[in-house]
Amino acid sequence: MKTLKILTVFTIVVAGIALAADQFIGFDAIKSSETNGYAIGDAATDFSLKNVDGNMVSLIDYKDAKGFIVIFTCNHCPYSVAYEDRIIALDKAFKTKGYPVIAINPNNPEAYPDDSYKKMIERSVEKGFTFPYLFDDGQTIYPQYGATKTPHVYVLEKVGQENIVKYIGAIDNNYKDEKLATDKYVEDAVNALLNNEPVKVKTTRAIGCSIKS
């Protein structure tokens, strides 16, 4: 009888350990599934995407760049529209300092016709975009980055032949009104890099419309 009790207790303990291990593995799997795309410190691969002027654009084309402000954005999303003037301002402020804006439309135009290549051309002319506005044809680039929203920003620093991710997230902390934004994440990140200082806020939550596949 004593032996049976010992075996019973042992079985319960083993079962408990197995269940805990299973739950732990499951938690790790969930965490892994939520961290697709680039993380801070990763090297971003280059791309070749069609610009609204008809030319193909790659990061390697920018021989004198110190880095890039890569922004996934689109025509129709109210959040993207709210940030258009600020994106133009970022390009004007930092392009001459070596950090040009590269805008990419990641949406499937079949899901949202307003985000078609033709409409992109119209929008870039209407707003006077000063930066490349690229079409992610086939939607192959945004998953590599891990972008989920429009807008979603990735600040890259050129280190040797690589483009290292230094910031991921939102442009600032108030999409409704630029004047009420107290934290200008992208601006602060690029200024830190230009001053050879560490980026203090490396990641924030991107606020915007979900990317349409």
Image: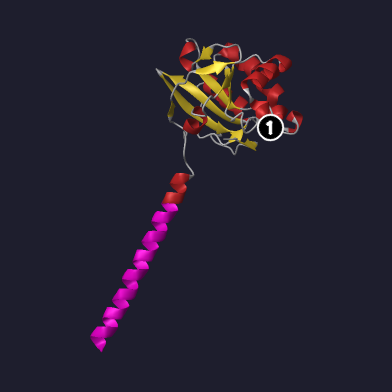
What colour scheme has been applied to the protein in the rendered image? secondary structure
The answer to whether 114 is drawn above or below residue 20 in the figure is: above
Residue type at mark 1: give it: Cys
Farthest-out residue, front: 110
The answer to whether 26 is drawn above or below residue 102 in the figure is: below
Circle 1 SS class? loop
The answer to whether 41 is drawn above or below residue 49 in the figure is: below
Q: Report the front residue among 125 and 189.
A: 125
Residue located 27% across and 79% down the image: 7
Q: Quadrant of residue 86?
A: top right
Residue located 38% across and 65% down the image: 19
Q: Report the front residue among 188 and 103.
A: 103
Left or right side of 12 for 187: right
Q: Badge 1 is on which residue?
A: 77
Left or right side of 202 for 209: right
Q: Say whether residue 5 is magenta.
A: yes
Left or right side of 191 for 37: left
Q: Which residues are magenta?
A: 1-28
Q: Quadrant of residue 210?
A: top right
Asked whether residue 99 is in view, the answer is no
**Where is the N terminus found, in terms of image quarters?**
bottom left
Q: Say whether residue 49 is magenta.
A: no
Q: Report the predominant secondary structure element of the magenta stretch.
A: helix
| Residue 82, x across and y down, in percent | 72, 29
**Where is the C terminus found, in terms of image quarters?**
top right
| Residue 133, x across and y down, in percent | 60, 19
Farthest-out residue, bottom: 1
